[in-house]
Amino acid sequence: MASRLLCLGLVSVLLAYYIYTPLPDNIEEKWKATLLDVTFRSLGHVSNFAELLGIKHYMDVMMFLTYAENTEPTSDENVTVTDTLFNNVPVRLYIPKKSTEALKSGVIYIHGGGWCLGSAAMKPYDLLSRRTAQKLGAVVVSIEYRLAPRFQFPTQFDDVYTVVKFFLDKTILNKYSVDPDRVAVAGDSAGGNLAAAVAQQLLKDPEVNIKLKVQALIYPVLQDLDLHTPSYQENGKMPLLSSNLMVRFWCEYITTDRRLCEAMLSNRHIPLEAADLFKFVNWSSLLPEDLKKNHIYSPQFGHSEFVKKYPGILDERVSPLLAKDEQLKGLPLTYVITCMYDVLRDDGFMYVSRLKKMGVQVVHHHYDNTFHGILLLNNWPLDFQIAHHIEERYLNWLKENL
Ligand SMILES: *[C@@H]1O[C@H](CO)[C@@H](O)[C@H](O)[C@H]1NC(C)=O
Ligand SMILES: *[C@@H]1O[C@H](CO)[C@@H](O)[C@H](O)[C@H]1NC(C)=O
């Protein structure tokens, strides 16, 4: 009895400890956000613990969320949904049923989850793709790329690029009645990273003649050079994406060598020899004043072993912000979403600055009252009003511009 009471007491104290992590006052639906934060962080702790005991890899436990939200491809009255292969890569296809137009628009969607988690079949993504197809009358191709830790860079990028190239072909577009002048690539978080990388890569690919009309980057990950930007420093403990988890995603994407994680955590994974690249992520010049606050810009350097062993760290397909100015020219009309309480906020802002400087048309919607991953919270029991609001604005914009 006494030991049970003691257990209960301990659990209560632990819970209280979780719950009392204060969130900013202006966070929308703060109570729900706190509950979400507690639950998600608990799962993180369970994952850490399971890994520590050698039972399961951290990401294998975290994948529980992805499996729990798995959906079968189910058509409804408006959209036909099927799972199929595009050049051997699995995709989930959404085709609107009642199409008034002879030719439809096309949206290639890339889900998030830090290159390690998530799935096109996850309920939040399934709902988003379905509503995209319905609202825009668009054919949506949602890509089921392979994930880390089983697969590292460039597998994720290659899977996505394979699908994009397969789709951006006259015969295929014709088969699905998609207008070659109205194709977009879109993605959130790590999916936004892959979308941005794909859009850049297409510009230098002589085999693809069809141009994207739009890239939509939803709170994207865009660089691994500086993991201590003001947003990393300020939002490291915000809901859904802590700075520790983001660093873990980064190193899992690149290698199974856990020493890279440690170096990245202290932001000492880039050697002095690569100092020149910091101009592309110089938040001192690329961020608006109100986000810099009183942070001091001082890049840090470490041993050169990591970039030698894992050149992916400095690859533009991994960090689209490392593309040279010239390579940004010619990118399509760009839509960017950023959230205030997100470690990746500054990645988004810096890309917006650089794209605008190079004459790319950019529409940037910044939300100062919410956190990373909010678009996933679009269904019971975690249904956030603001998720619907952001989604609606995004889809309205896409409908008008695609
Ligand atoms: C199908 O579209 C109609 C009209 O837009 C809408 O009212 C209905 O809710 C949609 N059905 C589903 C299952 O989403
Ligand atoms: C970053 O930008 C500031 C100006 O805002 C400049 O003084 C500094 O030298 C730049 N640093 C790098 C590494 O480019």
Image (tube, rainbow, N blue to C red):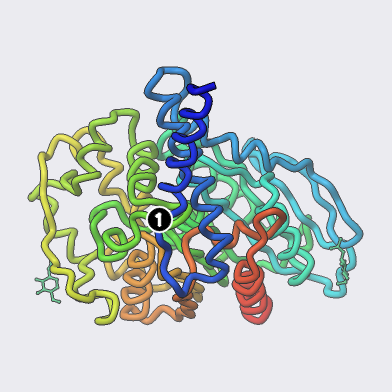
Residue 200 locus on image (x, y percent): 42, 61
Which amino acid type corresponds to the residue marked 1 in the rendered image? Thr
Residue 205 seen by the camera:
no
Residue 262 seen by the camera:
yes
Q: Residues within 10 Å of mark 1 (few under 14, many from 20)?
A: few
Residue 291 locus on image (x, y percent): 29, 76
Residue 59 locus on image (x, y percent): 47, 33
Q: The C terminus lies in which quarter of the figure? A: bottom right
Q: How many marks?
A: 1
- Seen in the picture, residue 287 relative to 64 is either above or below; the reply is below
- Seen in the picture, residue 165 relative to 286 is either above or below; the reply is above
Q: The N terminus lies in which quarter of the figure? A: top right
Q: Where, by quadrant of the figure, is residue 353 drawn?
A: bottom left
- Residue found farthest to the top: 54
Q: Residue at x 46, y 18 (%)?
A: 55
| Left or right of residue 222: residue 2 | right
Which quadrant of the frame does ligand 1 lie within? bottom right
Q: Where, by quadrant of the figure, is residue 80 drawn?
A: bottom right
| Left or right of residue 206: residue 261 | left
Q: Nearer the viewer, residue 369 or 153?
A: 369
Q: Residue at x 54, y 60 (%)?
A: 33
Residue that mark 1 sits on: 21
- Residue found farthest to the left: 272
| Left or right of residue 157: residue 375 | right
- Seen in the picture, residue 147 relative to 177 is either above or below; the reply is above
